[in-house]
Image (cartoon, grey):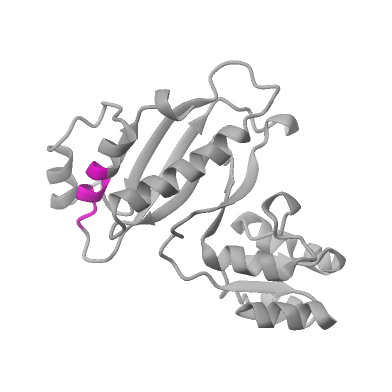
């Protein structure tokens, strides 16, 4: 892959193979974010889990204390009073069966998170092939299948993020923007890692957190020592 001048310049300022403590890694990753836009800082966590086994699947959600710096568009599938409640809570879109053809046939996907009341999951299930591959399917573990739509919408708007293993058993999640202070990024990182550590499967043998990397959208990644975060 061809790398730009900023990327190459950043790599020359530190040892990319060295795992740093969290504070140093955050300071370095902020320096690596040299794009003309406010880059997202992401955490990539390689685990020792085997997601092919249900008991080693990791999926959940956590509210970051300082949010992600991104405004999130929330779609809620609900009817009657629960639909009114979702609207009052600040959901961007609220609907039911009438949204199915719009998403299925027209390819409408102008939302970032989908919430559904349990009684609507039969309807939402028809969108599995569209929403599933994009990670948008509501899930009870992530708190997006719930009767408490007010709390769900409020949490998401406040900075709730979902984490899950990908096919390579890696978790990828944003923890803020390059414009965030080091303290805010550190708070968000520690909150995320607390949740990830609590989600460790009881059946897992061997090392849980194999590597942690912080990376801006366009710049090189920085390895974080796993010793102090487990």
- Residue 224, percent across and down? 35, 32
Name the image quarter holding the N terminus. Answer: top left
Magenta-drawn segment = 27-34
- Please say if 23 is above or below 139: above
- Residue 98, percent across and down? 78, 83
Taking the image as shown, residue 184 lies to the left or right of residue 120, namely: left
33 falls in the magenta region: yes
Residue 211 visible in this rendered orientation of the protein? yes
Residue 169 visible in this rendered orientation of the protein? no
Give the tally of numbered discs. Answer: 0
Task: Give 133 or 210, whichever is nearer the viewer.
Answer: 210
157 falls in the magenta region: no
By secondary structure, the bulk of the magenta-drawn segment is best described as: helix
- Please say if 226 is above or below 84: above
Taking the image as shown, residue 5 lies to the left or right of residue 213, namely: left
**Going 60% across and 79% down the picture, which residue do you hit?**
92
Task: Give 8 or 107, whichever is nearer the viewer.
Answer: 8
- Please say if 27 is above or below 33: above
Q: In which quarter of the image is residue 25?
A: top left
**Going 29% across and 55% down the picture, which residue do you hit?**
181
């Amino acid at each position: 892959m061809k790398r730009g001048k900023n990327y190459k310049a950043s790599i020359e300022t530190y040892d990319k193979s060295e795992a740093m403590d969290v504070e140093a890694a955050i300071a370095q990753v902020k320096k690596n974010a040299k794009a003309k836009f406010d880059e997202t800082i992401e955490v990539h966590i390689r685990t020792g889990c085997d997601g092919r086994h249900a008991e080693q699947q990791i999926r959940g959600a956590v509210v970051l204390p300082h949010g992600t710096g991104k405004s999130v568009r929330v779609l809620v599938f609900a009817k009657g009073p629960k639909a009114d409640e979702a609207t009052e809570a600040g959901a961007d879109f609220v609907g039911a069966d009438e949204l199915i053809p719009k998403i299925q046939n027209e390819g409408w996907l102008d939302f970032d998170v989908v919430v559904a009341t349990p009684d609507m999951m039969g309807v939402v299930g028809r969108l599995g092939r569209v929403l599933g591959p994009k990670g948008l399917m509501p899930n009870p573990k992530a708190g997006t299948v719930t009767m408490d739509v007010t709390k769900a919408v409020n949490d998401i708007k406040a900075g709730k993020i979902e984490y899950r293993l990908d096919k390579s058993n890696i978790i990828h999640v944003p923890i803020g923007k390059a414009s965030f202070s080091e303290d805010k990024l550190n708070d968000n990182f520690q909150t995320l890692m607390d949740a990830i550590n609590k989600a460790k499967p009881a059946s897992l043998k061997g090392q849980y957190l194999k590597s942690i990397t912080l990376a801006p959208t366009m710049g090189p990644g920085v390895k974080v020592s796993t010793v102090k975060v487990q």
